[in-house]
Image: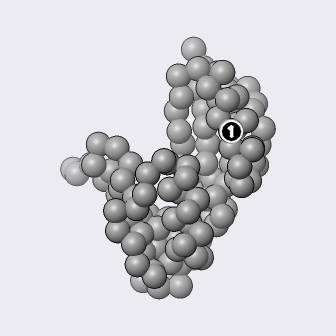
Amino acid sequence: MTDPNFLLLYVADIATSVAFWSDLLGRPPIEKSDTFAMLPLRDGVMLGLWKVDGVEPAARLTGGGAEIAFAVATRDDVDKIHTDWSDGDRTILQPPTDMDFGRTFTAADPDGHRLRVFCPAG
């Protein structure tokens, strides 16, 4: 069994998505064309942004069908990141909320991909 090392998101506009994700992650793409961009995450994992109209086989579902989660150390971190993201151009789908798994909020990228920030309960 191999470990996943690449996450692909289907996007409508490469430039818009690169700007969003570069700002969110605090790092530029290491590869970029009119139809694809790649940004490094950590430990060798990459985030690929692929223009949806060139995906083969064609994608049936785009943004909103899954989440990318960001675990943080404290409940206060959840609230601080929410404040930071609310001051930017990010769409907030759910304000900070206490759920059975911990404190969380949910945002979306320009294509509707859900971004969940959470601090695990316990």
Q: How many marks?
A: 1
Q: Which residue is mark 1?
A: 84
Residues 3 and 77: in front is 77
Where is 31 relative to 47, above or below?
below
Where is 33 relative to 102, above or below?
below
Q: Amino acid at mark 1?
A: Asp
Where in the figure is residue 6, as x and y percent of width and height? Answer: 35, 57
Which coloring applies here?
one colour
The image quarter in which residue 20 lies: bottom right
| Residue found farthest to the left | 1
| Residue found farthest to the top | 122
Q: Is residue 41 left or right of residue 74?
A: left
Does residue 59 appear anywhere in the picture?
no
The image quarter in which residue 119 lies: top right
Where is 13 relative to 101, above or below?
below
Does residue 89 appear anywhere in the picture?
yes
Q: Is residue 4 left or right of residue 85?
A: left
Where in the figure is residue 46, as x and y percent of width and height? Answer: 35, 56
Query: Mark 1 Cα within 10 Å, few/some/many (few <14, many 20+)?
Result: few
Find numbered disc 1 in the image and state the secondary structure of the residue it sits on: helix
Quadrant assignment for the C terminus: top right
Residue located at (39% from left, 72% from top): 32
Residue located at (55% from left, 49% from top): 24
Where in the figure is residue 61, as x and y percent of width and height? Answer: 59, 71
Where is 110 relative to 120, above or below?
below
Residue located at (60% from left, 32% from top): 118
Residues 107 and 122: in front is 107
Residue located at (36% from left, 53% from top): 40
Q: Is residue 47 left or right of residue 60?
A: left
